[in-house]
Image (cartoon, rainbow, N blue to C red):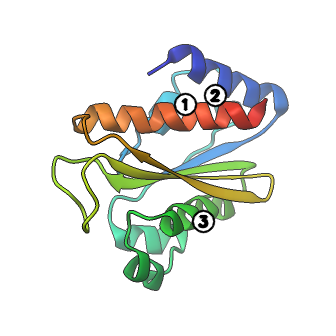
Amino acid sequence: MDEKLVNYVINTLIEENLSITAAESLTGGLFQSEITTVPGSSAVFSGGFVTYADEVKTQLLSVPKELIQQYGVVSYEVAVAMAQGAQKVLKTDLAISFTGAAGPTDLEGEDAGTAWIGITFHGQTDAYDLRKPELERNAFREACCQFAFQKISDLLV
């Protein structure tokens, strides 16, 4: 993980007085753990979600079961719904979500090393497809977090 990038993102959020939350599936809390490595991060981060099971995505983030059934959990649509759900529950300025197949096996027909990362910020929501099948499980999880911090950095410029 690029510690300098993580520090830049969190310190910029602090300077801009912008709050952040996360809804994580395949990353299992890794992104939120990285946030809290930065001193003062509690000024912008009050908590988040680890929603590994589909039912938990539905219960905590209000991701419709039908959406998961229609598009699959590893999808643009579910990443968007997770980010929007997290933002709605914790009323943050920015929310990020992670859903995917970390590996080593495929998930719902999606190759290992596939993820969708959703971001909600300033009333706009989008999701980004990240595919790195060459990485082993934990390296891919870290790559997802690195990608997310870079996307947030790009939004804050």
In the image, is 120 to the left or to the right of 37? Answer: right
Q: Give the amino acid type for the residue marked by disc 1 in the picture.
A: Ile
* Sequence-first disc among 2 and 3: 2
Numbered-mark total:
3
Percent coordinates x, y for residue 103 in the rendering = 21, 48
Q: Would you name the residue on which mark 1 appears?
A: 35
- Between 12 and 75, the one lying in front of the other is 75
Percent coordinates x, y for residue 37 in the rendering = 51, 22
- The residue drawn where x is 29% and y is 31% is 139
Question: Is residue 81 in view?
Answer: yes
Q: Would you name the residue on which mark 3 appears?
A: 85
Percent coordinates x, y for residue 38 in the rendering = 58, 21
Q: Nearer the viewer, mark 2 or mark 1?
A: 1
User: As displayed, is residue 41 above or below residue 4?
Assistant: below
Q: Would you name the residue on which mark 2 appears?
A: 41
Q: Where, by quadrant of the figure, is residue 19 drawn?
A: top right
Percent coordinates x, y for residue 52 in the rendering = 34, 58
Q: Residue furthest right?
A: 16
| CB atoms of marks 2 and 3 within 8 Å | no
